[in-house]
Amino acid sequence: MLRSNDTAKRSAEIVVAARELYEEKGLAHTSIQDITNHVGVTRSLFYHYFQNKDEVTAAVLDQYITDFLEALRRWHENQSQQSTEDSLPSMVKIMRQVLFEKNTFRLSLSAQENAALYLEFLNRFASQSAAYLVAHPIEDHTKYGLPSDHLYEAFYVLIVGLVSYLRTHPDADDEVLVDVVTRMLSADAAAVENVA
């Protein structure tokens, strides 16, 4: 048991070191040697935990997703205390923070040479966020429309679309984004009303 705890601890230290260096120097300017020097381990020990830089980078991306899910959890806990007018704008602010937090890693992740890595991150981010939103439904469905048989898919598409739109339109007004999200989440309700 102690050995597996030590393994998990050392692996986490390597991920933290990689994240710190990526944020400071950027992805392209951080080598495995930089990471091992930062942690104070040998390269062979690094390879005991991670096969390559891509694998440790994936673990760093998972940390970013975990950070967002924690923010989403806090948002959800406050949901019942917020009015509709306050809850969606606060979610838009969280999305902006996730996308535009200024550090070298975030900037390098959006560079053309990291497009495949960014797409992988976006898909994992959307998948885990949508799964969270489905597992933690908003109690008052009248706020954002009716429940759907395809909530996961709706949230996934909404998240990817919102992220893509914000990345290409960083100066978009929050009010516009809130209106778009509200309309998309209310689409099921409108469809039901139109059929009736």
Image (cartoon, rainbow, N blue to C red):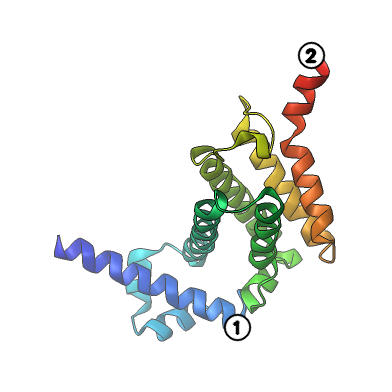
Mark 1 or 2: in front is 2
User: Residue at (66%, 34%) from the top-left corner?
Assistant: 142
**Circles 1 and 2: CB distance less than 8 Å?**
no
In the displayed structure, 22 sits above or below 132; it is: below
From the image, tell me which residue sits under label 2: 196
Residue 89 place in picture, x, y as percent: 71, 57
User: Residue at (83%, 19%) from the top-left corner?
Assistant: 194
Viewer-closest of 194 and 7: 194
Residue 86 place in picture, x, y as percent: 68, 56
In the displayed structure, 28 sits above or below 62; it is: below
Residue 118 place in picture, x, y as percent: 66, 58
Left or right, 54 with respect to 146, comes to left
User: Residue at (73%, 68%) from the top-left corner?
Assistant: 111
The kind of residue tagged 1 is Lys
Displayed quadrant of residue 143:
top right
Label whose residue precedes the other's in the sequence (1 or 2): 1
From the image, which quarter does the N terminus lie in? bottom left
> Can residue 185 be seen?
yes
Q: Secondary structure at mark 1?
A: helix
From the image, which quarter does the C terminus lie in? top right
Viewer-closest of 196 and 43: 196
Determine the CA span between mark 1 and mark 2: 58 Å
Viewer-closest of 75 and 83: 83
Displayed quadrant of residue 96:
bottom right
The kind of residue tagged 2 is Ala
From the image, tell me which residue sits under label 1: 25
In the displayed structure, 150 sits above or below 15; it is: above
